[in-house]
Amino acid sequence: MAVAIKVPALGESVTEATVAKWFKNVGDAVAADEALVELETDKVTVEVNAPSAGTLSEIAVDAGATVSVGALLGSVTEGAAPARAKAPAEAPKPAPAKPAPAAKAAPAPAKSAAMAKDPGPAARKLIAEKGVDAATIAGTGKDGRVTKGDILAVDARPAPAPAEPATPRETGPREERVKMSRLRKRIAERLKQAQNTAAMLTTFNEADMGAVMALRDRYKDQFEKKHGVKLGFMSFFVKACIVALKELPAVNAEIDGEDIVYKNHYDIGVAVGTPQGLVVPVVRDADRLGFAEIEKTIGELGKKARDGKLTLDDLTGGTFTISNGGIYGSLMSTPILNPPQSGILGMHKIQPRPIAVGDKIEVRPMMYLALSYDHRVIDGREAVTFLVRLKECIEDPQRLVLDM
C-alpha cells in the first residue's frame, strides 16, 4: 500500500517552502521516521520523515520546486521495492538570459515659448503647495501663462507605468549563478526592512576585559567540572545586558503601530553564523537563568543552528540581540537591528591596547562595544547610559553576582 508524503505544517504565517534536497532515490528502502526530504522555509530548515517503513516509490516534486503546506511530495510503498521510477533531480540552473536591447530614448520635447511664461499669482501659490515644476507645464492662459487650472490638471495625468524588472546579466565563463535560498532572501528582507523603517543610530564605548578574563581563568576548571559546560564570555554579557535593560526599559521595547510596547521579560537573541546564513536563536527568560544555564542554552542553540535543527519557536519572540563579531576577528562594526527589536549589542575582538589607568599607561585587554538602536524609541542619553552600565558590569563582574 502506498502512503503519501506531504508537506507538514511549517509554523505560524509560513505557507510555502522550497524542496532543498532528497536524501533517498526512488526504489531505496526506508525505515519508519527516517529523514527523506529537506524543506527550506524563509525561517528554518525542516526535515520530512518517512510515514512508514518500506520503499520510496515516488518523488512527486524535485529539488528546487516551491511547495505549499499539504502538497504531495512523494510516496512510500510498504513492502518490497517496486520498479524504479524517476530519481530526484537537482534544481535546474536557469539559462542565462540574453540582455534585452536597450530602448532608444525618446527625444526630449523642446520647451515652447508658452512654457517659459511666468505663472499668475494664484498659480504660483498652488505650485508652491504641490511642489510642481512650472517649467514642465504648458500654459493655457493669456500669452501662454500657467494658470491655476493648468496646475490642477497635472494631478489628472496618468501615473507612469512601473519600471520593467531588470534583466539578469549574462553569466561569464568564470562565474556561477546560484538561486538565492529562502533563508538568505528572508535575511536580506529583514535587514533592509530595519534600514528602511527604523531611525537607526550606533553609539560606541569600550570595556576593559581584564577582570572578566581573570575571573574566568580562576574558576573555569571548577565551573566546567561542576556544570559540564565551559564558562565563556557570552554569559557575562547576557547578564550585563539584563542589568542595563532593567534600568533602561526603552532598549527592551518595540514599536507596534502608534504604540510602544515595553517588555518586562528578557528573551535575549544570540546571533549565530551558519553555512546557510545568520540566524538568531533566543535564550528565553535569561534573567531567570544562572551563568551555567545560559552557557548550556547558548551551546545547545548553536549546535541546533549548525545542524539546521532550529524550530520557529527557537527563533521568534526575542526582545534584544547580542552579536559577537569578535569571534571572526572584527575590531569594530555597526550591527543592524533585528526587527521589531529596538536595540542590538555588537561585541568585538579583545585587543591589547595602551590605556591610561590613573596616571600610568598600561596595556589592557580592551573590547569595543557598539549599540545600534532605533532612535524613534531610544534617546541618545538612554543609549549611552546603556553602554556605560554594561561597561561597569563587565569591568566589575561582582556587580552581576550581586545584581547591581
Image (spheres, rainbow, N blue to C red):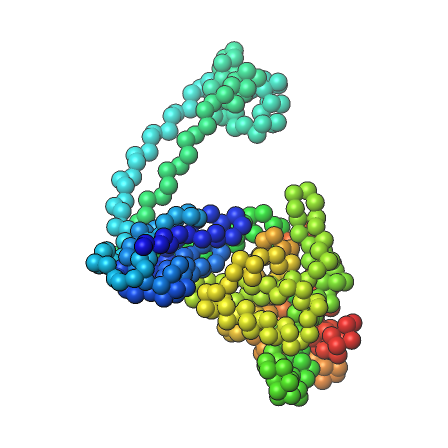
Position of the C terminus, as image quadrant, is bottom right
Residue depicted at 75% across the width and 83% down the height: 359
Q: Is residue 394 visible?
A: yes
> Percent position (x, y) of residue 210?
66, 82
Q: Would you say residue 146 is visible in this rendering?
A: no
Q: Residue 48's x, y, as percent?
A: 41, 59
Q: Residue at x 47, y 19 (%)?
A: 138
Q: Position of residue 208 (x, y in %)?
A: 67, 78
Q: Residue furthest left?
A: 83
Q: In the figure, residue 388 lies in which quadrant?
A: bottom right
Using the image as rendered, state which of residue 33 and residue 136 is in the foreground. 33
Query: From the image, which quarter does the N terminus lie in?
Result: bottom left
User: Looking at this rendering, what residue extends furthest in the top direction?
Assistant: 142
Rendered position, 180 above or below 124: below
Q: Is residue 403 left or right of residue 331?
A: right
Please give the name of the residue rendered at 34% of the width and 29% of the height, measured from the top-left corner: 107
Closer to the camera, 111 or 289?
A: 289
Of residues 382 and 214, which is closer to you in this image?
A: 214
In the image, 393: left or right of 221?
Answer: right
- Relative to 124, say whether 389 is above or below: below
Count of numbered circles on the image: 0
Q: Is residue 338 above or below residue 16?
A: below
Who is closer to the viewer here, 235 or 308? 308
Kindly indicate the quadrant of the structure image that contains residue 247: bottom right
User: To which quarter of the image does residue 132 belong?
Assistant: top right
Q: Residue at x 56, y 59 (%)?
A: 313
Looking at the image, is 357 positioned above or below residue 22? Answer: below
Residue 227, how many percent across, how many down? 63, 82
